[in-house]
Image (cartoon, helix red, strand yellow):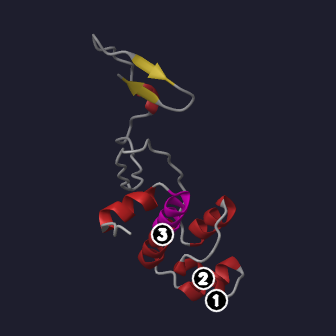
């Protein structure tokens, strides 16, 4: 019997859906733990807010819980967060970063109607239901 290297075993594991499920659970629970710490929400408080036992919360952080989208949304909300789901093509790297909401105020005496649209040569305006993007 030929002994496989760690790299070979790793590549075999990556071909299995169970690897990717475990990776998603690990990523979710790590992010949940980070945000709970950032917000100062203890595991006991998470249990209280969920209306469940501390043992269940421990199970969640061990990665032993079978998550549904509903349970992930509830967990995110108890730490003051929102669940985001993103699909990336195989082999593509994804980086997330958070941008704090900044409320911008107009200088005194100005209103949004005081501004006019300026068209720049070579810039095409594209709109969807909520966002204007210049390309």
Do labels 1 and 2 touch, CB within 8 Å?
Answer: yes
Distance of mark 1 from mark 2, alpha carbons? 6 Å
Q: Which residue is mark 3?
A: 26
Distance of mark 3 from mark 2, alpha carbons? 12 Å
Please report the bounds of the magenta region as a residue range: 16-27
User: Which of the two labelled residues, at mark 3 and mark 2, occupies the earlier sequence position?
Assistant: 3
Q: Which residue is mark 1?
A: 55
Lateral position of residue 113 relative to residue 46, left or right: left
Of residues 109 and 114, the one nearer the viewer is 114
Provide the secondary structure element on which disc 3 rests: helix
Residue 49 drawn at (x, y percent): 65, 79
Q: Quadrant of the N terminus?
A: bottom left
Lateral position of residue 36 relative to residue 94, left or right: right
Q: Tell me where residue 37 sits by quadrant.
A: bottom left
Q: Tell me where residue 4 sits by quadrant.
A: bottom left
Provide the secondary structure element on which disc 2 rests: helix
Is the residue 100 above or below the residue 87 in the image? below
Provide the secondary structure element on which disc 1 rests: helix
Distance of mark 1 from mark 3, alpha carbons? 18 Å
Q: Which residue is mark 2?
A: 59
Determine if the magenta segment contains residue 133. no
């Amino acid at each position: 019997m030929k002994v496989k290297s760690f790299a070979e075993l790793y590549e075999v594991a990556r071909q299995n859906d169970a690897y990717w499920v475990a990776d998603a659970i690990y990523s979710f629970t790590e992010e949940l733990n980070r945000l709970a710490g950032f917000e100062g929400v203890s595991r006991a408080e998470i249990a209280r807010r969920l209306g469940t036992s501390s043992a269940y919360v421990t199970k969640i952080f061990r990665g032993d819980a079978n998550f549904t989208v509903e349970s992930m949304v509830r967990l995110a909300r108890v730490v003051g967060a929102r669940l985001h789901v993103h699909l990336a093509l195989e082999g593509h790297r994804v980086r997330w970063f958070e941008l704090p909401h900044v409320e911008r105020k107009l200088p005194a005496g100005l209103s949004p109607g005081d501004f006019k649209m300026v068209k720049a040569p070579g810039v095409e305006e594209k709109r969807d239901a909520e966002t204007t993007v210049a390309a």
